Image (cartoon, rainbow, N blue to C red):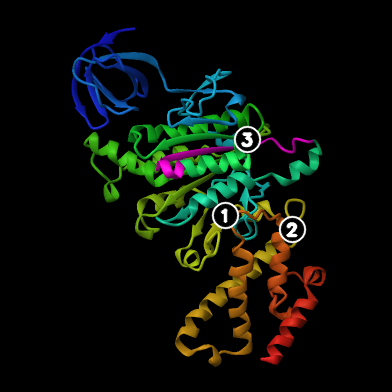
């Protein structure tokens, strides 16, 4: 292995060195500083006679006297089932005080794209225990469903709630053994504050969720370059557990905005021509490389499901990060500032939210036969109630008809009883749909025009409808 002392320039997180032999793109480099510290880096650019190295631990302490060694291999993640219950830093080193990781295998973190021919269509329900997701925007095994949030909103609480509660219900029923289904959570945190990291760890340990989780922590004061490696480490671990150990893996990545900021920072250090709003032109490709690692493979038991979380700068969903994410993923869950200011937890707004794979993952045998109809009817009724709220601001409630007032009441109750469940309540899909019927039974049967008549006969709560009618008559 050749060692060079040919560093010519240090720029931000990048080190430029002269070489006299070809060096491969993405190859791993060790840089030994004059005071004996060893730092790891990765080849970002390789041209004849010169390489650009991005240093994971930051370039502090590196000068022209530092020596550079090229290891001849790309970055690998040591993978083993024993990673479950462990906490690692952003580059895969243990930080929980536990023993060294003894890997079964070492996998390339870039990963291989799933062959489209071998992809199995995602259509099995994952129960998150959150009514606004399970009932209205169902998550399906193998899907990528991002959460669109904004600064100051409780997306971390929602992420923790999903990490704690997520299960694959029908597997538990089928197997009937003590273990239930082999379900694992990979939690990749990028650019979070030490305070947020402590909250995450406290919650994981308090609730016992850590036992079935692997946590990757890249903090805000860690180098930006490490942030670009963290999600790849997390996804490589997920793929190993899913496709070699038959786990159903849920990958939660927060915050993708910090990841994209790191891409922009590195792009600026490389003096690349910037794209929209200063982000690199290849950001779409880069995000797709991460998001497309979700899915199912024919003939394999396991699956990788992704929930990336991003904070929209300036609450703007036309910003490049949510915009590009929306193109690649199968829908989005919106966290709403107005609902949050009303104290609703979790403040998920079902109207702009969407799960494109929901229709295939619900219904008889998967959730319940009335799921699709109940969801459609609640969506329509809530949308009408929202429109009427705007009208009330202009003409006042007295000017509205009895029917309009019923829709306004529904919108209020929908937020208070269906969406607002707190961050510690875990609802089964049956409980979620039953609450839906409680609310829909406010309406006379002819108003339920999106639900099959047989289902109305089976689930409609006559007692609720009568009570509402009496209230309206009394008013």
Upstream in sequence: badge 2 or badge 1 = 1
Q: Earlier in the sequence, mark 2 or mark 3?
A: 3
Spatial separation of the CA atoms under disc 3 and disc 1: 28 Å
How far, Cα to Cα, is label 2 from label 1? 22 Å
Tell me the quarter of the picture where residue 137 sits. Answer: bottom right
Q: Is residue 305 visible?
A: no
Q: Position of residue 46 (x, y in %)?
A: 28, 23
Q: Where the C terminus falls, by quadrant?
A: bottom right
Between residue 372 and residue 424, name the one nearer to us: 424
Q: Position of residue 373 (x, y in %)?
A: 69, 65
Residue depth check, mark 2 versus mark 1: number of the one nearer the observer? 2
| Residue 124 inside the magenta-drawn segment | no
Which numbered dot is residue 428? none
Which residue is disc 3 drawn over?
A: 212
| Label 2–label 1 contact, CB within 8 A | no
Q: Earlier in the sequence, mark 3 or mark 1?
A: 3
Where does the magenta region start and end? 178-197
Residue in the image at 35% along x and 58% along y: 314
Instruction: Give the structural element (helix, strand or loop) at label 1.
Output: loop
Q: 359 or 185: which is nearer to us?
A: 185
Q: Which residue is mark 1?
A: 356
Total marks in image? 3
Residue 458 seen in the figure: yes
Residue 194 placement (x, y as % from top left): 41, 41
Between circles 2 and 3, the one closer to the viewer is 3
**Please, what secondary structure does the residue beneath circle 3 have?**
helix
* Cβ–Cβ under 8 Å for marks 2 and 3: no
Classify 33 as above or below 384.
Answer: above
Question: In the rendered image of this protein, does residue 426 appear above or below residue 21?
Answer: below
Quadrant the N terminus occupies: top left
- The residue carrying mark 2 is 430
């Amino acid at each position: 292995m050749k060692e060079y002392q040919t560093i010519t320039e240090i720029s931000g997180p990048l080190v430029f060195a002269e070489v006299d032999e070809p060096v491969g793109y993405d190859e791993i480099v060790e840089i030994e500083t004059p005071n004996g510290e060893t730092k790891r880096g990765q080849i970002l650019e390789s041209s004849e006679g010169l390489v650009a190295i991005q240093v994971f631990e930051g370039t502090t302490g590196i000068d022209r006297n530092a020596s550079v060694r090229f290891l001849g291999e790309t970055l690998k993640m040591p993978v083993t089932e024993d990673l479950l219950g462990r906490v690692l830093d952003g580059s895969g080193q243990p930080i929980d005080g536990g023993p060294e990781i003894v890997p079964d295998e070492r996998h390339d973190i870039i990963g291989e794209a799933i062959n489209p021919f071998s992809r199995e269509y995602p259509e099995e329900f994952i129960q998150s225990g959150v009514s606004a997701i399970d009932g209205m925007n169902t998550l399906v095994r193998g899907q990528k469903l991002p959460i669109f949030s904004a600064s100051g909103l409780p997306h971390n609480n929602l992420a923790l709630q999903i990490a704690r509660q997520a299960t694959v219900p029908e597997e538990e029923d089928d197997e009937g053994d003590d273990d239930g289904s082999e379900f694992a959570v990979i939690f990749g945190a990028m650019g979070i504050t030490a305070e947020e990291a402590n909250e995450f760890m406290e919650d994981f340990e308090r609730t016992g969720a850590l036992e079935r989780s692997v946590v990757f922590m890249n903090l805000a004061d860690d180098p930006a370059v490490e942030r670009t490696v963290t999600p790849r480490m997390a996804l490589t671990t997920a793929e190993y557990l899913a496709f070699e150990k038959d786990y159903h893996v849920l990958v939660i990545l927060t915050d993708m905005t910090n990841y994209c900021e790191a891409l922009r920072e590195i792009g600026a250090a490389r003096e690349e021509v910037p794209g929209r709003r200063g982000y690199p032109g290849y950001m779409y490709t880069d995000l797709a490389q991460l998001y497309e690692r979700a899915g199912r493979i024919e003939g394999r038991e396991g699956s990788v499901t992704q929930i990336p979380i991003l904070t929209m700068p300036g609450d703007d969903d036309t910003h490049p990060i949510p915009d590009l994410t929306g193109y690649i993923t199968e829908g989005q869950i919106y966290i709403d500032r107005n609902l949050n200011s009303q104290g609703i937890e979790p403040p998920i707004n079902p109207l702009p939210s969407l799960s494109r794979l929901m229709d295939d993952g619900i219904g008889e045998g998967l959730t319940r036969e009335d799921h699709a109809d109940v969801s459609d009817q609640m969506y329509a009724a809530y949308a009408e109630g929202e429109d009427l709220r705007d009208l009330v601001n202009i003409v006042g409630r007295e000017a509205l008809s009895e029917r309009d007032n019923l829709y306004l009441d529904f919108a209020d109750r929908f937020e208070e009883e269906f969406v607002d469940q707190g961050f510690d309540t875990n609802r089964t899909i049956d409980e979620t749909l039953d609450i839906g019927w409680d609310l829909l039974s406010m309406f006379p049967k002819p108003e339920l025009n999106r639900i099959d008549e047989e289902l109305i006969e089976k689930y409609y709560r006559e007692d609720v409808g009568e009570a509402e009618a009496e209230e309206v008559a009394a008013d």
